Amino acid sequence: MTYTATLTAALGGVTEAQLAHWRRRPNPLLIPEHAGPGKIRYSFRDLLAVRTVANLRAEVSLQKIRKAVTNLKHFDDFDHLSNYQLVADNDTIVWVGDQAVDILRRPGQQVLVTMRDVLGEFVGWTGATVVPLAHPKPGLRIDSLVLRGYPVIDESRVPYDTVASLAAEGFDGEGIRQFYPSVSDVGVAGAVAFDQYVREYGRAA
């Protein structure tokens, strides 16, 4: 499964307008892996890249991020942005691989850096707190090996929005289990809470 721009923004800590800006040519920062005419869908790898940029943007400008990514392409046989651990450190950007290397102010110079966890909770671009990626709400999980990283009810393969839709139609936990026996009451509550988070994040952005 893939992510809509709305879900990507809510999980990535950015706005849909920013995602659209990053897609613009001639120098796009991030083009979704599943982009086509009239279709914009993000992959799990894209989401990791979005969270990386959002974390960097809390400390450095987007212009510097673009320059650092451009420099990175000269250092390595560049793949997907999600394959690189990038952190902001003292107004520069560092690529952390086998060693930590400055890729902005002193390209190629090795440095010491404090790592930040892009998978954990953080304050996003809008000032709102972005949920942790692995467990965005109690009873939910995001695992790249399950439905390609789409949010599901814990211990199941049931998408959160399927359960949230049933709850919105008036089904309680017991009623939902008539369709999906593995869905717990905690999972139902988590799906509803996460669905509300995504909706409110989009409105706030």
Image: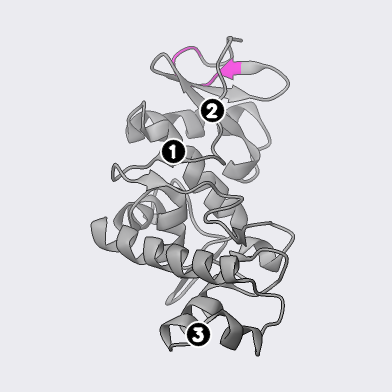
Cα separation between marks 3 and 2: 37 Å
Q: Give the magenta-colored segment's residue range.
A: 101-106
Labels 2 and 1 touching (C-beta < 8 A): yes
Q: Most prominent secondary structure in the magenta stretch?
A: loop
User: Residue 174, how many percent across, how many down?
Assistant: 60, 84
SS for callout 1: strand
At label 2, the amino acid type is Arg
Using residue 167 as the reference point, say whether residue 159 is left or right of it: right
Q: CA distance from mark 1 to mark 3?
A: 30 Å
* Residue 89 at x, y percent in the picture: 46, 17
Using residue 180 as the reference point, say whether residue 51 is left or right of it.
left
On the image, numbered disc 1 is attached to which residue?
122
Kind of residue sitting beneath label 3: Leu
Q: Position of residue 68 (x, y in %)?
A: 47, 28
Determine the secondary structure under disc 2: loop
Q: The disc labelled 1 sits on which kind of residue?
A: Phe
Task: Decide which of 47, 193 is in the foreground and name it.
Answer: 193
Q: Which residue is mark 3?
A: 166
Which of the two residues, 200 or 65, is positioned nearer the viewer here? 200
- How packed mark 3 is, by other alpha carbons closer than 10 Å (few <14, some 14-19, many 20 or more), is some
Residue named by callout 2 = 116
Q: Is residue 126 above or below residue 34?
A: above
Give the secondary structure at mark 3. Answer: helix
